[in-house]
Image (spheres, helix red, strand yellow):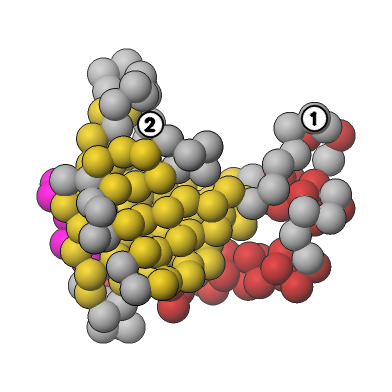
Amino acid sequence: MAEHAGTIHPPKIETFDVAAGTNTDPKGTVREVEEYRVEPFGLYMARPAPGRAQFHYLESWLLPDLGLRLTDFWFSPGYERDQDFYLDVVTVDRDGEVWRATDWYLDIVLREGRDLEVLDSDELLAASAAGLLSQSDARGALEIAYTTVAGLAAHDCKLRDWLSTMDIELTWRRH
């Protein structure tokens, strides 16, 4: 946990305002969204990523019942990463057309049909030790990660196959 000294932060909260067509990041930067789509199982968002060198576009799905945000980053040349999807462990609150995702530190990098990797367990533990989230919230984040890893592993790390067992069919612009 010492490696996070000075960098420990409270859980990040991001806002998705469907009616306004905007996405507000945890620092308060508001960005225009090209497309929102509300489905019974979640919310889809597609938007450019101005000001980001690493990627120029992103698509995300918020899946509240699974405690996940799934993102496909469209990496810029020279910044490509060996990943197909980036999964954030989150809780989602919804107030009408406004959705808020609280990021619980843990992330999963999915390489479709090959493998996955859980990231930032050290951040979760450091934040919990610092009192920035309750033990109950930390345990909940771990349980979401365990459930997700087990589900993906049982389906050969194929997102579509795993989600289909829960009648969730995601559509993406480039997948």
3 part of magenta stretch: no
Q: Position of residue 54 (x, y in %)?
A: 37, 24
Q: Main secondary structure of the magenta part?
A: loop
Q: Quadrant of the N terminus?
A: top right
Taking the image as shown, residue 102 lies to the left or right of residue 73, namely: right
The spot of residue 34 in percent (x, y) is 16, 46
Amino acid carrying label 2: it is Arg
Tell me the number on the disc at residue 175: none
Looking at the rendered structure, the kind of residue marked 1 is Gly
Task: Look at the image and give the residue range highlighted in magenta.
Answer: 170-175
Q: Secondary structure at mark 1?
A: loop
Residue named by callout 1: 6
In the image shown, does 131 or 147 lie closer to the viewer?
A: 131
Name the spot of residue 51 as percent of width and height, x first: 34, 22
Residue at horizontal 30 percent and vertical 77 percent from the top: 41
Q: Nearer the viewer, residue 175 or 21?
A: 21
Is residue 152 shown above or below 13?
Answer: below
Whether residue 120 appears in this view of the structure is: yes
Sequence-wise, the earlier of marks 2 and 1 is 1
Residue 151 visible: no
Q: Which residue is mark 2?
A: 81
Residue at 63 percent of width and 65 percent of height: 141
The image shows residue 10 at horizontal and vertical percentages of: 69, 48
At label 2, counting other C-alpha atoms closer than 10 Å, the crowd grade (few under 14, some 14-19, many 20 or more) is: few
Residue drawn where x is 23% and y is 70% of the image: 38
The label nearer to you, 2 versus 1, is 1
Q: Where, by quadrant of the figure, is residue 16 drawn?
A: bottom left
Question: Which residue sits furthest left?
Answer: 173
Residue lying at the far front of the rendered structure: 20
Task: Give the residue furthest to the top.
Answer: 78
